[in-house]
């Protein structure tokens, strides 16, 4: 997967409003597309979630990759609301001796729209955040 990301990085890396990212790997790479729709992989995710799941039909988002800059002093990505109930996060970097890299998940039933905007102004309550260390 990392070799696929690196193959397309130079020609497809974009700077959006939050970060540098690589989008569209589901279109660019047969491997990413096949992985996304692999029945065995999807069964693992369904078993973990305890409910039937299927891949998102927005293939542009399959294999979406964010790029961080070590030593930049800022998060690779900012707080945002995903359009799906479940996402799969993979880290392709060697995390040995790396500061940061935590995934923070807001544990709230609905953090969209005006409520999310309010969180961005007032701050995210630490008691509602689950931090995953890799």
Image (tube, helix red, strand yellow):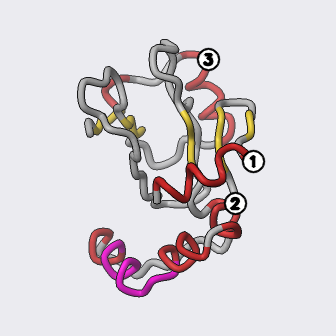
- Distance between mark 3 and mark 1 Cα atoms: 36 Å
Position of 133 with respect to 86 (left or right) is left
How many other residues sit within 10 Å of disc 3, few (<14), some (14-19) or many (≥20)? few
Q: Nearer the viewer, residue 57 or 24?
A: 24
**Pointer 2 residue:** 24
Looking at marks 2 and 3 on the same chain, the residue that comes earlier in the sequence is marked by 2
- The region drawn magenta spans 37-45
- Distance between mark 2 and mark 3 Cα atoms: 32 Å
In the rendered image, the quadrant that contains the C terminus is: top left
Secondary structure of the residue carrying tag 3 is helix
Residue 10, percent from left and from top: 69, 43
**Pointer 3 residue:** 121
Residue 42, placed above or below residue 21:
below
Residue 86, placed above or below residue 80:
below
Residue 79, percent from left and from top: 54, 32
Q: Nearer the viewer, residue 79 or 115?
A: 79
**Pointer 1 residue:** 11
How many other residues sit within 10 Å of disc 1, few (<14), some (14-19) or many (≥20)? few
Instruction: Name the residue located 74 percent from the left edge and 35 percent from the top edge.
Output: 16
Mark 1 and mark 3 in contact (Cβ < 8 Å)?
no
Instruction: Name the residue located 38 percent from the left edge and 35 percent from the top edge.
Output: 104
């Amino acid at each position: 997967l990392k070799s696929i990301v690196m193959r397309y990085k130079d020609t497809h890396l974009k700077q959006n409003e939050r970060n540098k990212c690589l989008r569209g790997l589901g279109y660019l790479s047969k491997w990413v597309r096949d992985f996304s729709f692999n029945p065995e992989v999807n069964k693992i995710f369904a078993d973990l979630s305890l409910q039937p799941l299927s891949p998102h039909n927005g293939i542009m988002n399959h294999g979406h990759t964010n790029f961080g800059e070590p030593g930049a002093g800022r998060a690779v990505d900012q707080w945002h609301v995903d359009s799906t109930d479940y996402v799969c996060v993979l880290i392709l970097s060697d995390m040995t001796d790396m500061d940061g890299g935590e995934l923070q998940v807001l544990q709230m039933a609905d953090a969209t729209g005006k409520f999310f905007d309010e969180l961005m102004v007032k701050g995210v309550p630490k008691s509602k955040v689950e931090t995953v260390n890799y």
